[in-house]
Image (tube, helix red, strand yellow):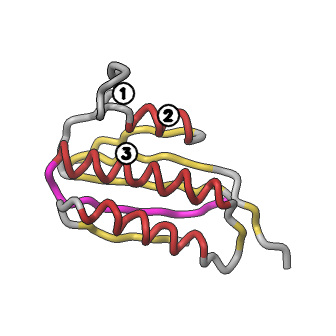
Amino acid sequence: MDLRTVLPCDASSVGVARRLLRHELTTLRHGYVDADLVDAAGLLVSELVTNAIVHARTDVALRATIRRGVLRIEVADGSPVVPTPRRPSGLAGTGRGLQLVDRLSNRWGVQKSRGGKTIWFELSPIEQAVG
């Protein structure tokens, strides 16, 4: 699987990203993806695309690949500002996105580029089909 798309800086892009990813993961031809992994990937991609739209205010490039049983999702935007996880108060309605990424993914990080940054995370395992 190698999903690549650019989404406009619009709130509707969050749902589009989640649906595209879910479709790709549930129609894999050469592997099986656990439903919990699909749900976690959808939640995390929603968080990162939302963050990019709200904070970077640029179009968002989404890439999802599977290599050696590991799902890697990358969300790139045009802002050079690197996010930092926050510790919101118990009643705060925002600020938990990167905490979710940290808790649900196997690993994650930020890669700076000349045109902005890419936030990525990995989830595993994805069972490979036999035969």
81 displayed left or right of 97 = left
Mark 3–mark 2 CB contact (< 8 Å): no
Name the mark on residue 102.
Answer: 2
Tell me if residue 113 is in the magenta stretch: no
Which residue is depicted at the point 37% across and 39% down?
110
Few, some or many residues within 10 Å of mark 2 (<14, 14–19, 20+): some
Question: Closest to the observer: 121 or 51?
Answer: 51
Q: Disc 1 residue type?
A: Pro
Quadrant in the picture for the N terminus:
bottom right
Name the mark on residue 119.
Answer: 3
Expressed as whole percent of the image width and height from the top left, the position of residue 107 reads 55, 38
Q: Disc 2 residue type?
A: Asp
* Residue 84: quarter of image: top left
Q: Secondary structure at mark 3?
A: strand
Real-space CA distance between mark 3 and mark 2, rounded to the nearest whole angstrom? 12 Å
Residue range of the region highlighted in magenta in the rendering:
57-68
- Secondary structure predominantly adopted by residues drawn in magenta: strand
**Mark 1 sits on what residue?**
85
Where 64 falls versus 110 (above or below)?
below
* Comes first in the chain, label 1 or label 2: 1
Expressed as whole percent of the image width and height from the top left, the position of residue 85 reads 36, 27
48 displayed left or right of 30 = left
Expressed as whole percent of the image width and height from the top left, the position of residue 96 reads 38, 33
Where 99 falls versus 80 (above or below)?
above
Mark 1–mark 2 CB contact (< 8 Å): yes
Few, some or many residues within 10 Å of mark 1 (<14, 14–19, 20+): few
Real-space CA distance between mark 1 and mark 2, rounded to the nearest whole angstrom? 9 Å
